[in-house]
Amino acid sequence: MSIDELIKDEKKINRALYSSGPYWDYKNKRAILEIKKKGLSDFRGVSAGIGTSFTDNQVLDIRNEFNIRGRIAGKIFSLPFLKIIFNSQLHTTQNYLDLYLQNKAIVYQNDKNVLRLLKKFKFENTTDFGCILSFKHSGKNYSCHYLDMADRIDKLSELFNFKKITSIFEIGGGFGANIHFLITNFTNIKKILYLDTVPNIYVGTEYLKSFYKEKVKDYSDLKHLNKISFSDNNELEIFCIPPWLIEKVDVEIDHFHNAASFVEMPKEVVKNYAKFIRKFNTREISLISYDNYDLKTTFNPEELNDFFDDSLNVSWKKTLIESYKKNLIYLTSK
């Protein structure tokens, strides 16, 4: 599967329903430029702006965050005198970033909730692809992001028995970390449908392929099928699809999950996805979103219940590091 194949085919579909909305449009254009220029080897580091907003990369050079017009303007910093000044600023910013990462590591290394999760769950290969937002415990490196994922699953485990789930459907799965964590800890989960927009789905597919190889079916494997269905066996299958392929999917799903991205979509898009979630006879639903949302770009996450006939329970819960004093909203079917 190539990124160009996804980009070309996206131009042929109903973009109002199956392409990124206004919130993600600029970010996705920038990410495509960065993917083509730098590849994926460091998408969780600082050298590329591929994953800003959906991965755990860190922003050092703002020029990586520009799209075409911004990059043209950014060329001015290549002029000899300005280049010296800008590089000096990058050096200063790098020093502050290093201190931030050191502080973050100290917080995670010593947090009681983190230590409890490290004992409860397995964490394997969580810092691949250049991850720098990490910490060390007992001689092993761990991604802070994976601990955040573990905290969410731990809280959801109070309502759902993940040991009895066979199939899961996730929309907007970041770069695949949540799916990787779930498969690592719940070997009973064998059938996964993972959907995201272009180019996020490209990043997530390649990330999951690095662990599960041929068990991952990408866009090239699936796009010519008349019907996309799981095999009737106990083998691991991970279907990674762009939004428009959902119309070909014919499956039943035990658990559907979305974290944050629904509120960043036009409401008509969420309504359309909710239709398919019902079509797949989905047994359980979990939605998570953040506080301090901006109504200029997103909508109130409590409104997500409207798309599910007000059938979801709503609660606000603290994030993993309680001293940060941030909250997440959980909307669940139980």
Image (tube, rainbow, N blue to C red):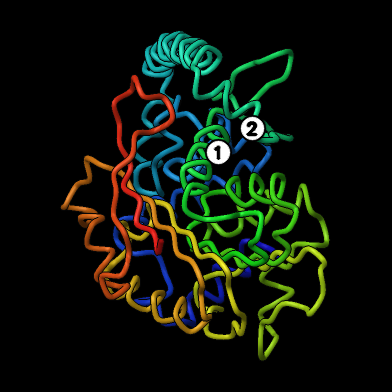
Give coordinates of residue 252: x percent, y percent. 60, 79
Residue at (52% x, 12% y) in the render: 110
Question: Within 10 angstroms of label 2, few (less than 14), some, or many (20 or more) residues?
Answer: few
The residue that disc 2 covers is 120
Q: Quadrant of the N terminus?
A: bottom right
Return the residue nearer the eye: 11 or 318.
318
Return the residue nearer the eye: 66 or 21.
21
Q: Which mark is residue 150?
A: 1
Q: Where is 294 relative to 29, above or below? A: above
Q: Quadrant of the C terminus?
A: bottom left
Give coordinates of residue 108: x percent, y percent. 51, 18
**Quarter occupied by residue 136:** top right
Give coordinates of residue 234: x percent, y percent. 81, 69
Type of residue at label 2?
Answer: Lys
Secondary structure of the residue carrying tag 1 is: helix
C-alpha gap between disc 1 and disc 2:
9 Å
Return the residue nearer the eye: 268 or 286.
286
Secondary structure of the residue carrying tag 2 is: helix
Q: Is residue 294 visible?
A: yes
Residue at (38% x, 77% y) in the render: 17
Type of residue at label 1?
Answer: Ala
**Quarter occupied by residue 274:** bottom left
Return the residue nearer the eye: 80 or 36.
36
Is label 1 in contact with label 2 (beta carbons under 8 Å)?
Answer: yes
